[in-house]
Image (spheres, rainbow, N blue to C red):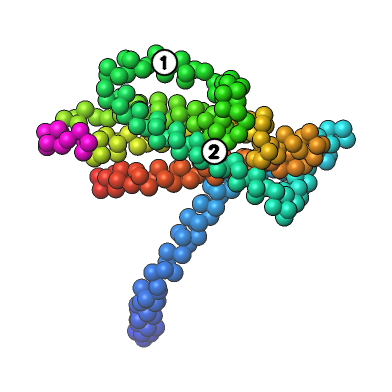
Amino acid sequence: MTAPTLTKDAAAPAAPAARAADAGRTAQPAGARHLPSLVRSSARRAGRGIWASGAILLFLLLWELGPTYLASPSTRVFLPPLHEVLRALGSLLAKGQLQNHLAASLTRSASGFGIAVVSAVALGLLVAWYRSLDRFLNPLLEVFRNTAALALLPVFTLLLGIGETSKISIVAYAAFFPVLLNTIAGVRTVDPLLIRAARSLGLSNFRLFQKVILPSAVPTIFTGIRMAGTSSILVLIAAEMVGAKAGLGYLIVNSQMSFLIPDMYAGILTVSLLGLLVNYLLVAVERHFSRWRTAVGSQSN
């Protein structure tokens, strides 16, 4: 008769203990409960970052170990390991030579690129909007856009000399057509319903371009601008190899002629990093001017 009573009495304290444990779990901070998920998400992001940069890391590793262990001694002279190139890059930085060459190239490239973007966007808007102007200019534009910029480098040099004017002009020519063609394509792909709605609200042509056409064409225009940014650097490097006393192209070709092979690769590496930086900057500018698209997309979700 006493055994069931003892069992009930012994089990009675278990309920408050369970309630206390549940209360302890309830009183646990929210941050502590979400900590494992945060760790997992951070690990996933880190894994994606490592995977995205894996090809570059393998290339740099091959550049470091390949000339030393895989290449012949004669090849190693013309393909130094990565650490020798980085040492040469540091030496050029310490002497101030790389900064001078980089400043000269950036000045020429930025000047030609700016001229090309302003003129190409303005002309692209006019050509896309006025069909008669398009029919008049399109044959001539097709001829020049299919003519490589480097093929005209001797012409620019003969007409404008070997000074800054010829280099800025060849950069502007190379960067002009990607921006022009993408501006025309961007304007022509604007939704006609948006244009009709804007006209029904009484918008003038200027306000129509400002409020409807340009914002809608921004992604396509910036695709051309990014292509033009790459072209402006590449064409300038080639122009500086022909006739210049400063610039990254001059540094590369002069190092090759002087048999300073690590300095040559240091200049090439600088050009690659410069092109990558310019691309990231243009992507950031594009995101800035396309924020309204993100805002509209987030509201619709």
Residue identifier under label 2: 109
What residue is at 24 percent from the left and 29 percent from the top? Answer: 191
Say the numbered circle drawn on residue 69.
none
Residue 200 inside the magenta-drawn segment = yes
Q: Mark 2–mark 1 contact, CB under 8 Å?
A: no
Please determine whether, in this image, residue 267 is positioned above or below residue 91: above
The type of residue carrying mark 1 is Leu
| Left or right side of 283 for 63 | right
Callout 1: helix, strand or loop?
Answer: helix
The percent coordinates of residue 44 (x first, y second) are: 51, 51
Magenta segment boundaries in residue numbering: 197-208
Pick the quarter of the image with the N terminus: bottom left
Say the numbered circle drawn on residue 140.
1
**What whole-number distance in Å separates the C-alpha atoms at marks 2 and 1?**
25 Å
Residue 90 in sight:
no
Magenta stretch prevailing secondary structure: helix
Callout 2: helix, strand or loop?
Answer: helix
Instruction: Work out whether residue 296 or residue 13 is closer to the camera in this orientation and state it.
Output: 296
Residue 161 occupies quadrant? top right
The percent coordinates of residue 131 (x first, y second) are: 27, 19
| Left or right side of 164 for 88 | right
The type of residue carrying mark 2 is Ser
